[in-house]
Amino acid sequence: MTSLLPLTTPVDAASAISLATCVAPLVDALIRDADALRLKASRGPRDALIVDAGIAAAGGLEAGRRIAEICLGGLGRVALVPAGRFSPWDTLASVSTSDPVLACLGSQYAGWSLAAGGFFALGSGPGRAIAAVETLYGELGYRDRGEKVTLVLETSVVPPAEVVDEIAARCAVAPSDITLILTPTSSLAGTVQIVARVLEVALHKAHALHFPLEHIADGVGSAPICPPSPDFLTAMGRTNDAVLYGGDVHLFVHGPVDAAKDLATRLPSLASRDYGRPFGEIFAGYDCDFYKVDPLLFSPARVTVTAIDHGESFTAGGFDPILIARSFGG
């Protein structure tokens, strides 16, 4: 059984649902289809269920697509669609959701820092809303409860028992009721689930710009699937570049026209001081210190914002196919 704690705006109490309930069929299906998806599901530290999506198991594009939908808490759809935007990189991860704020920020955002004994990873997925250790949940006025906890970790190693213990304690569940889906950055599944964060990246930056989250009614996004690389830094650079220079997001918002126009102007990656070079170069230029990179860089290349109460739309930013080719082909 799952239940919700009391809610306040911006998540509407009348319409809020349990992420744990919504995602359960997707997680069950992923485990049931593990062999077909080239995944490996097995019991790990403290008897937690570990789903290997690219460490020892091969994984693949379809696995990544389904894991991305799990990251969205069962409230979104991810499709791999053909497009001619960046030939020959002509496949896009296309993302839509029925509740962009809850799906993207409440679930998909990688906001839970998990560390122990030299291990570090950021947890994303619906289990975050059960632990609710991030201040973001106070702003959202949302917290979930559930007997099963699912998290997606971008990592190439299995978390130690101490990390499982922390998750179990924070979520008040037995370790055996925890499912950890592991998606290395250099894997095909990891590539897809990272690129499929294009809409979430836009929501996160809108939040950083103090745009009222309750005014965001809907949204869609897409970004090109980049080739993976066995080198972690190259793989990380390509997945970031896919969004920063190839991502496209359309948000539908309530409120004044001027607010919608201002959001469109400030949201694209072009507005950042670090815009204009492959992310790998930017990262190296800051001595590989992620926190020195301008946080406002992390946003889609092009953004359209529609003020749905007024019927007006505003577009800013643009794609950089030359930089995409430089990043993906290097």
Image (tube, rainbow, N blue to C red):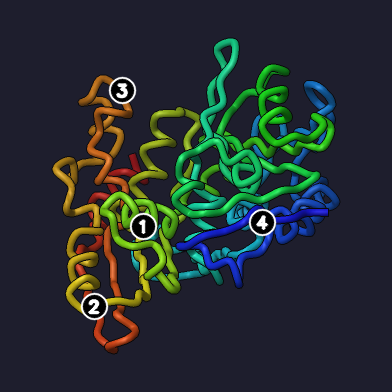
In the foreground, 226 or 200 = 200
Question: Residue 103: x percent and y percent?
Answer: 55, 59
Residue at the spot x=73%, y=30% of the render?
168
- Mark 2, other Cα within 10 Å: few <14 / some 14–19 / many ≥20: few
Residue at the spot x=18%, y=64% of the render?
265
Image quadrant in which the C terminus is located: top left
Marks 1/2: CA–CA distance: 19 Å
Marks 3/4: CA–CA distance: 35 Å
Q: Which residue bears the numbered disc 1?
A: 202
| Direction from residue 81 to residue 31 in the image, left or right | right
Q: In which quarter of the image is residue 211?
A: bottom left
Marks 1/4: CA–CA distance: 21 Å
Question: Residue 269: x percent and y percent?
Answer: 24, 52
Kind of residue at disc 2: Pro
* Mark identifier at residue 288: 3
Asked if marks 1 and 2 touch (Cβ < 8 Å), the reply is no
Residue 215 higher or lower than 5, as above or below: below
Give the foreground label among 3 and 4: 4
Q: Which residue bears the numbered disc 4?
A: 19
Element type at mark 3: loop
Residue at the spot x=55%, y=49% of the render?
193
| Direction from residue 283 to residue 105 in the image, left or right | right
Kind of residue at disc 1: Ala
Kind of residue at disc 3: Cys
Q: Quadrant of residue 150?
A: top right
Residue 250 higher or lower than 185, as above or below: below
Asked if marks 3 and 4 touch (Cβ < 8 Å), the reply is no
Question: Residue 228: x percent and y percent?
Answer: 49, 41
